[in-house]
Image: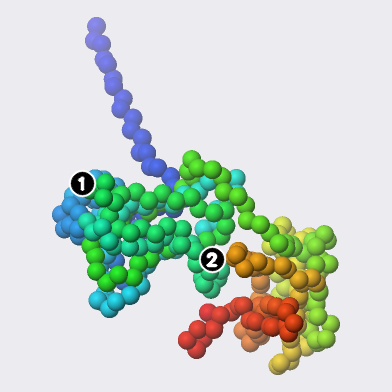
Amino acid sequence: MLSLLVLCLITYSYTESYLLRCDFETPCTNFTTDQNWGLTDGFHPRPIDHDHTLNNKSGHYLFYSPISEARFQLAEIKTTDWLTAPTDRAICFQMWYYTPRLSLPFSIQLVQGDDELLTRVIASIPGKDPSVNDWTQINLLLPAEKIKIYVRLNVSVGPLAFDDFTVDYCDKPRPSPPDTLLACDFESYCTDKFISLPEYIYQWSVIEADDAVKQQRQAPPIDYTFGNGSGHYVWLKNSTYIQPGNVAYLATRSSLNLTSNQTYCLNFQYYGYARNWYKTNLKIYSMISNETPVVQMLWPTYRSGEYQ
């Protein structure tokens, strides 16, 4: 009798899953670098002879290669897209760096706002950790907010190397949700918090998406909150009387008390659909209620001869 023993070897490819990751062994899409960075491996050390991911000479990492020796030149690496961290779980940013210099400062910053002008430094790294002669870890808890992550430095010389950028869930205390001073999705409970200033020809009004399409074919057929035709949004029905110079103002009915020791963000969604939309201007203003009220344009910001 012939006995046949068949061995089956089943292999599984295992890949760790992250919210965002760049290990520089495959094309990196989650993070964007400027022209001051290059890619190398341990066979061409700049300045270390192995990477962090594979821990060998064949692994790849980023190295700092400034395009200019000018003092205080800014170099940066940032997340490609906006990151919205949840409020029910902790999210951390982790990266690894190497430098043999005790003094080679760089910082990790959080940026907010479409103009990316609101910046917070959440970590300042002076240079080499004297107790470590290899890759050094940075692990930072992120706030439950819509942010971009920036790694920035303004020194004109290296050597400095980065590897393994990740954003993922982590075992840290859950961050506190941001304080909300005012919120409105333009359903029934909050419509009285806003007013269309009556002195102007154009007037804002709240409408159901289904009704808006009946009145104006190009209007958004769904709202942003519910994503269907029964949801509401505030709109400007102006297709029949667009005239140069005419404006409409949607304002909060009451003032918001902002303190100087905190930062605040205004978030909203807009949809442009009129035939001459490209000729219109959407702007955000604030009015500071002092003895003499001061009106200030918040958005868009004006830089170098053009609006951003």
Q: Which residue is mark 1?
A: 56
Check if mark 2's residue and mark 1's residue have beta carbons within 8 Å: no
Q: Position of residue 10 (x, y in %)?
A: 33, 30
Label 2 or label 1, whichever lies nearer to me, is 2
**Amino acid type, residue under disc 1 in the picture:** Asn
State the image quarter where residue 233 is shown: bottom right
Pick out the residue farthest to the left.
43
Residue closest to the eye, 92 or 81 = 92
Q: How many marks?
A: 2
Residue closest to the eye, 37 or 246 = 37
**Amino acid type, residue under disc 2 in the picture:** Gln
Which mark is drawn over residue 76?
none
In this picture, residue 121 sits left or right of residue 202: left
Secondary structure at badge 1 equals loop
In this picture, residue 114 sits left or right of residue 206: left
**x 26%, y 46%: residue:** 131
**x 27%, y 65%: residue:** 64
Q: How is the image coloured?
A: rainbow
State the image quarter where residue 211 is shown: bottom right
Image height check: is 108 above or below 156? above
Q: Which residue is mark 2?
A: 112
Q: Position of residue 138 (x, y in %)?
A: 38, 51
State the image quarter where residue 204 is shown: bottom right
Query: Which quadrant holds the N terminus?
Result: top left
Q: Residues within 10 Å of mark 2 (few under 14, many from 20)?
A: some
Residue closest to the eye, 179 or 233 = 179
Earlier along the polypeptide chain: callout 2 or callout 1?
1
